[in-house]
Every structure is written in C-alpha cells, then in structure tokens.
C-alpha cells in the first residue's frame, strides 16, 4: 500500500467475499479495532448487509466513508429508511447549484417521483449534450466532421461538478471533480467541493441506536 | 482483541450453525434412508427462502410463523418428487441419480432466476435490526429466533423417528431394505415420506435463514456443498451429528474469520472436513458401518 | 390356497425359474427341495412380490397376485420368513414386532398377536428393549418368525429357517413350524435339512435348475431313489 502523508492511522483492513451473505464477523472484527471511522469499498448488497450488522452490533463509528457504489443508491435509501442516514460517499457527482442540475432535478421529480438524481442520469444526459452540441457545430453527420467537433467540445453550462466539459488529447475530461455526498433524511446532500456544497458535513454521524 | 468479541462471534456462529445443521439434517435423513444424495438440496432451500420472501412481501407474515406452512409445502414437493421421479431411479446406477438431481437443481435455479431476477432479496422483519445484550455479549435477535426454531424442529423430527410407528417404519427401511419388503412395508411410499421430511427440514431451515441472510437464485450450490461438509463432518445418517456438524462448522467459520481473514473462512470449514476424513472417516457421531 | 401356474422368473436376461407350477392346500406343510442355486429363494421372492420380472399366474386366496408389490401381497395374508432372517438390526426387538404389525390387516390384532408370539418365544419378551442386531442367530430367527406372525399371515413361506443354527436350535425351529401348522397355519418350507422337511411335509416338490422335476407326498419323495441319492446322501 502506498504511504501518504496523512494524519490518520489505518488500524486494520478487512477483505471479504463480495458475494457473501453474512458480514457479522467482519463487522465484529472492525468494531474490535476501536476505529473512529469506517472506510468502505462495497456494492449495494454488502453495503446493506454492513449497515444491518452495524445496527445489530450497536456500533456507530464517527463516520462511514464510501469510495464506491452502494451507500448512496436509491435502493439503499429506500430499504434502510432512517438507518440509511449518515454515510458519506466520495464519487463523481453533479453540482446542485448549476442551472442544468436544477432543471434535471425538477424534471426527474415530475416524471419519476421518488427517484434521486444521480451520476448515471447526469452522465447519460451530458453524453447526449456533447453529441447534440457537436452535431450543431459540425453542421453535418459526416463522421470526420463530427469527430473533430467532439474533440473541440467546450461546454461550460453542464451539470457535473467542475468547470465544464472539455476533452484532452486522450479524449478524457480531466476537469471533472470528485465530490462528497452524504445521506441525510433520505436525500443526498453535497458536502464538497466547496463551490458545489449545499450542506455542512454531519460529523460524527448520528448514532444508529434509537433511530428504529 | 477483547474476549467479548470472541464470545459475540462464537455465539453468532453457534446460532447460524444450528440453522445450517437443520438444513444438513434434511440431506442426512434422505441419504440415510433412501440412499440417494440430494444434489438439489441447496436449490430446494432457495425455493423455501423465496417462498418466505414473497409471502412476507405480500402478507407481512413473519418467517417464524411461515416456517410451518413452508415446511409443509416443501414436504409435498419432496414427496411428489420422490414418488414420481426418484423412485424409478432408486435401482439405477448412482451417476444417473446424480444427473437427475443436478438437472433438477439447474431447472430450479434458473426458474427462480427467470421469476425473480439475479438481485439479492431479503425480508425486513420488525426485529431485523434488533439485538439483545447480555453482559458483554450482544446477540442478533433474528439469529436467536432462528437457532431456537432449528432446535425445536430437530427435536420434533427426532421424536417422530423414535416414538411414532411411521418413524420406526422409516428407520426400518434404512436398517434393512430387504427386511422392509419382507414384512410388507410400502417402501416406495415410505421413501417418498422420507424425502418429504428431508425437504421439510430444508423448508424450515430456508424460512429461518432469510432472517439471517438474503437470497439470490444462485445461492443453491453453495448450500448444497455446505450441507455435504456438515453431514460428512457430523456423521452420515446421524441426526445429532448433523446438528453438531452444523454448529461446529458455523463456529469454525466465525472464529476463523475473526482470527484470520473473513474471506478465507470457508477454507477452515473444509480443513475441518479434511481432518475428519483423515482421522475419523465416518464422521464425529457416525456409526461404524455394519 | 396358493396355486402357481407356469411361473417364469428372470434376472435381466437370465431365466431363473422355468414353468414352475405348484399347489399349496390350506392347512398343509409343503416342502420345496433343491440344490444350492436351484431357484428356491427366487421362487419365494417371486411369490412375495419382491421379484417382479415374471410371467405366469400366482393365485392366492382366489386372486392372481402375479406382479403385485410386496406390501399388497403381505396384506393379503401371504407372509414370509426370509433367507438370512432380515431383522432390523438397530431397532429394538419390540420395535421389530411393531413393524411386523403395521400391515393394515394386522393392526387391530396387534395386542393379541404380541401376547401370542411372546408366549411362544419368551426370550423375546426378556430382550424386548435390546437392539435386534445384538441377538444370537437362533434368537434372531425367532424374532423373524414372531415378526412375521405379527402380520397375521395365513400362509408363511420359510426360506432356510435353520441355516447357520446349532443343530439343537435348528430342530427346535422345525418343531416350532410344526406347532404353528398344528394351530392352522399353512406353510411353504424351504429347508436344507431335506430329510426332516420331507417328514414334516404333506406334499413336496423337487426343484432343479429352475424347473420342478419331481412332485409327490413327503413320504413318496423320501422313498424316491433319485431324492435319496441326490439330497439325502444315501
Ligand atoms: N440378484 C440376482 N441376479 C442374478 N441372478 C441371480 C440373482 N439372485 C439369484 N440369482 C441366480 O438365480 C438362480 C437361483 O438362485 P436362488 O433362487 O438364490 O437359489 P436357491 O435359493 O435355490 O439357492 C441362481 O443361478 C442364482 O445365481
Ligand atoms: Mg436360497
């Protein structure tokens, strides 16, 4: 593992089978380390299993920080209800302050009530945006003209966190910024980066006890 | 690590192991009497789990109450299966029986896949997140209920085999097949009954297991394998052996997960199996073959 | 009571019985005599519904039972004390008797029958809680007979009841069969002790390579030269 100059101590790391159906031992072991925070890399299923075990084993770390999917997904929020609140996910996200984001949120609420806008939706939308923009500038459907137009993309009015959509020589949009998103009251709030934040972090997270 | 952690994990292992033991008991009863290895055992349990999940979703009936009707449904399924498909295979070579049951397993798993899709499903009981604290030990409420129910079902089955005439007749079939024919027992019907009872164990175990873990259509083979490991460890044909084997494997996996890495815990279950096969091939409580 | 007509029995491609016909009258003891491998056990198993690859007629109490499964045959009153005793070794003596009384025809009579067989074999009462596998050979043979009687049969087929028993006990076993017959039970007897079984029998058949080669009263066969040289060593 690479060493970073971080003011944190990793007190332990626990690997588990992603197809597992019981994470009680894993959580018992994590709890026994006395860790202040839990860093998780999981998917939906194990995220729910882990949460269930945290509740049953009566352990609320100061924070749960996820570096992947699972913890912010609609299914997680819906299944766990009030027990879903607290975890913070570090993921690509949209900037809730941007005009397009607000439009997308409003449109989604109308057509699919109860579904939270997420990066899958936003990226799909932005892909269409890039294609439409390129077609408009190319003025034809000639493949070469379209490809050139896509390379020259410069969209600043988008939804993702960051300055906008431009592609580097490798075709990557390296201007996209990661974000921190926390589950709060069955919704998702953005904590970071600063320009996208619409809430302050809740830290330490509320105890699982008495949330029922 | 503080001692209480070991205690917590061990208690959880015992309770889960009891449910595993009940599942394995079904396999042991079927093999002990009918002499057919039920390679569709895990899939039958998956069916029970999905019945529990669906009935819970529709009617909000607690899996612990559902245990009885689900065991009954699986009983009928097992009875019909033995009476229609397996009885004609009793005298065929073992590899044809194997193919028959593996085919059945594949059909069951894929039917579940078609109906329910590949995602995991679970039940959310009122006590799904409850736990009891006794001194330093925190025990998962669902596991306590499931473990207790496993004991009750096993005791009931044990009493059936020891005390009822029908139970004695089934034991007689296992004891001496020729003898059973000689005295005029309807062996095929008793076999069907036995397969039904084995399936009922699996049904009961499955409806309790949904309290502890969630189900996907593809969990079957893992449970079949687990049942084999437990039955061989505990002793083929021994009812207390199946329960003991279940508890032993449950605790071993839990403690091994704690001491080493959880992802390697099934390795330790197999290590126990290998040790038993090396030093006591008939299993811990298995009887010496006559 | 029992009439067998042209019975052929097969083990796959191998024919073990070929056109066997015989008659057992009510109240009789009928003996079947034959060398090892002649087909005596096969005959009994076929009559009992345990060997069902067959052709021909088996008429018992007016019904053609050829092809019936064994549990239906038993329930019609055709009982069997099988070769090798076939007790249930891990069940207790009492449980073995319970199983014998499970036939629908015998359930209501179970208490009376138990009294009767325990009076006949007091040693079984003493060992009622013992596993049958721990009994001596003679005791196991008594248990096999007692268990069969619990099923309230009208005809019992005995297959080598004295095989492997000490001579004195073997004689006792044959004495038991005579007593049972005296009480009105019809018997079909396959017995290695040919001289004794022919003495007991009112009628007897000689089976050779799956065929009946000789039939007559017990006394006639005892006097027959072929029987005397082949089976009595005289
Ligand atoms: N299960 C079997 N499969 C094939 N052949 C058999 C089987 N049992 C008996 N036989 C054959 O049938 C013939 C008759 O055997 P059996 O009825 O046991 O004779 P017995 O009782 O007169 O000694 C023998 O040739 C024997 O080898
Ligand atoms: Mg014989």
Image: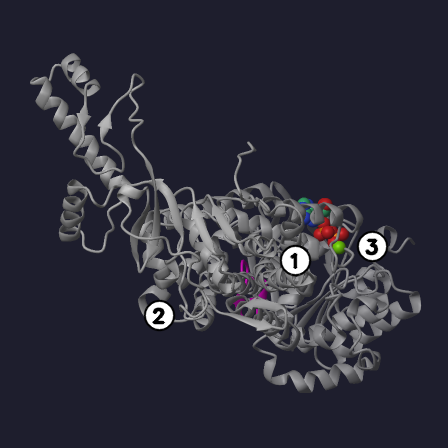
Q: How far is disc 1 from disc 2 in space, using C-alphas?
A: 32 Å
Q: Do the residues labelled 3 and 1 touch (CB within 8 Å)?
A: no
Dot 1 corresponds to which residue?
A: B251
Q: Which circle's residue, 1 or 2, is located before the other in the chain? A: 2
Q: Under tag 3, what secondary structure?
A: helix
Range drawn in magenta = C60-71
Subunit of label 1: B
Q: In the rendered view, does A68 fall on the left or right side of A118?
A: right
Query: Label 3 to label 2, Cα distance in Å?
Result: 80 Å
Q: Which of marks 3 and 1 is in front?
A: 1
Q: Which residue is drawn at 24% across and 47% down?
A: A117
From the image, tell me which residue sits under label 2.
B60
Where's the N terminus of chain C, which quadrant?
bottom right
What's the residue at 50%, 61% (across, down)?
B212
Q: In the rendered view, would you say A9 is above or below A24?
A: above
Q: Position of residue C151 (x, y in %)?
A: 65, 75
Question: Mark 3 = which residue?
Answer: C227
Question: Picture coordinates of residue A1 (x, y %)?
Answer: 56, 33
């Amino acid at each position: 593992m690479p060493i970073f100059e971080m003011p944190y101590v990793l007190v332990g790391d626990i690997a588990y089978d992603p197809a597992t159906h019981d994470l009680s031992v894993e959580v018992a072991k994590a709890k026994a380390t006395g860790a202040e925070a839990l860093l998780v890399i999981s998917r939906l299923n194990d995220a729910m299993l882990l949460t269930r075990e945290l509740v049953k084993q009566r352990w609320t770390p100061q924070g749960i920080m996820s570096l992947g999917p699972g913890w912010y997904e609609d299914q997680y929020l819906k299944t766990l209800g009030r027990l879903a609140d607290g975890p913070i996910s570090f993921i690509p996200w949209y900037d809730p302050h941007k005009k397009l984001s607000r439009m997308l949120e409003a449109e989604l609420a109308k057509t699919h009530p109860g579904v939270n806008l997420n990066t899958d939706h936003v990226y799909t939308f932005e892909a269409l945006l890039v294609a439409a923009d390129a077609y408009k500038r190319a003025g034809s459907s000639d493949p070469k003209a379209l490809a050139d137009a896509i390379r020259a993309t410069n969209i600043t009015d988008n939804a993702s966190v960051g300055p906008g959509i431009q592609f580097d020589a490798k075709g990557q949009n390296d201007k996209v910024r990661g974000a921190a998103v926390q589950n709060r009251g069955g919704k998702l709030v953005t904590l970071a980066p600063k320009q996208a934040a619409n809430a302050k972090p809740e830290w330490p997270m509320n105890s699982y006890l008495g949330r029922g | 690590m503080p001692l209480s952690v070991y205690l917590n994990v061990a208690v959880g292992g015992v309770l889960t192991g009891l449910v595993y033991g009940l599942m394995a008991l079904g396999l042991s009863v079927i093999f002990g009497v009918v002499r057919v290895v039920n390679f569709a055992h895990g899939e039958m349990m998956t069916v029970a789990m999905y019945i529990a999940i669906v009935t819970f979703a529709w009617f909000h009936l607690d899996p612990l109450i559902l245990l009885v009707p689900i065991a009954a449904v699986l009983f009928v399924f097992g009875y019909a299966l033995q009476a229609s498909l397996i009885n004609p295979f009793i005298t065929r070579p073992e590899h044809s029986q194997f193919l028959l049951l593996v085919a059945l397993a594949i059909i069951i798993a894929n039917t579940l896949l078609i109906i329910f899709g590949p995602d995991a499903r679970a039940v959310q009981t009122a006590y799904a997140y409850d736990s009891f604290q006794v001194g330093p030990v925190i025990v998962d409420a669902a596991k306590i209920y499931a473990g207790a129910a496993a004991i009750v079902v096993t005791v009931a089955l044990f009493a059936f085999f020891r005390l009822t005439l029908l139970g004695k007749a089934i034991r007689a079939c296992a004891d001496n097949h020729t003898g059973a024919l000689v005295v005029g027992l309807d062996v095929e019907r008793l076999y069907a009954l036995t397969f039904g009872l084995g399936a009922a164990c699996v049904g009961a175990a499955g409806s309790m297991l949904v309290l502890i873990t969630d189900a996907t259509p593809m969990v079957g083979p893992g449970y079949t394998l687990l049942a084999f490991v437990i039955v061989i460890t505990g002793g083929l044909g021994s009812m207390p052996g199946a329960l003991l084997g279940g508890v032993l494997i449950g605790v071993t996996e839990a403690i091994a997960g704690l001491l080493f890495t959880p992802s390697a815990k099934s390795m330790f279950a197999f290590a126990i199996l290998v040790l038993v096969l090396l030093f006591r091939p008939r299993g811990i409580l298995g009887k010496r073959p006559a | 009571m029992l009439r067998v007509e042209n019975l052929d029995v097969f083990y796959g491609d191998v024919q073990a019985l070929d056109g066997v016909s015989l008659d057992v009258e009510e109240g009789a003891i009928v003996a079947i005599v034959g060398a090892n491998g002649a087909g005596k056990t096969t005959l009994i198993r076929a009559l009992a519904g345990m060997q069902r690859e067959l052709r021909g007629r088996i008429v018992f109490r007016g019904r053609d039972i050829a092809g019936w499964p064994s549990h239906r045959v038993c329930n019609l009153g055709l009982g069997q004390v099988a070769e090798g005793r076939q007790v249930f070794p891990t069940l207790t003596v009492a449980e073995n008797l319970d199983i014998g009384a499970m036939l629908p025809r015998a359930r209501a009579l179970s208490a009376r029958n138990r009294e009767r067989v325990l009076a006949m074999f007091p040693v079984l009462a003493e060992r009622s809680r013992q596993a049958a596998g721990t009994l001596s050979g003679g005791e196991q043979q008594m248990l096999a007979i007692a268990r069969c009687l619990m099923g309230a049969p009208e005809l019992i087929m005995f297959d080598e009841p004295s095989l492997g028993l000490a001579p004195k006990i073997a004689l006792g076993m044959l004495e038991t069969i005579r007593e049972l017959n005296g009480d009105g039970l019809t018997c079909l007897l396959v017995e290695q002790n040919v001289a004794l079984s022919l003495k007991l029998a009112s009628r007897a058949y000689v089976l050779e390579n799956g065929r009946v080669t000789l039939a007559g009263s017990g006394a006639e066969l005892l006097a027959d030269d072929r029987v005397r040289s082949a089976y009595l060593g005289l």
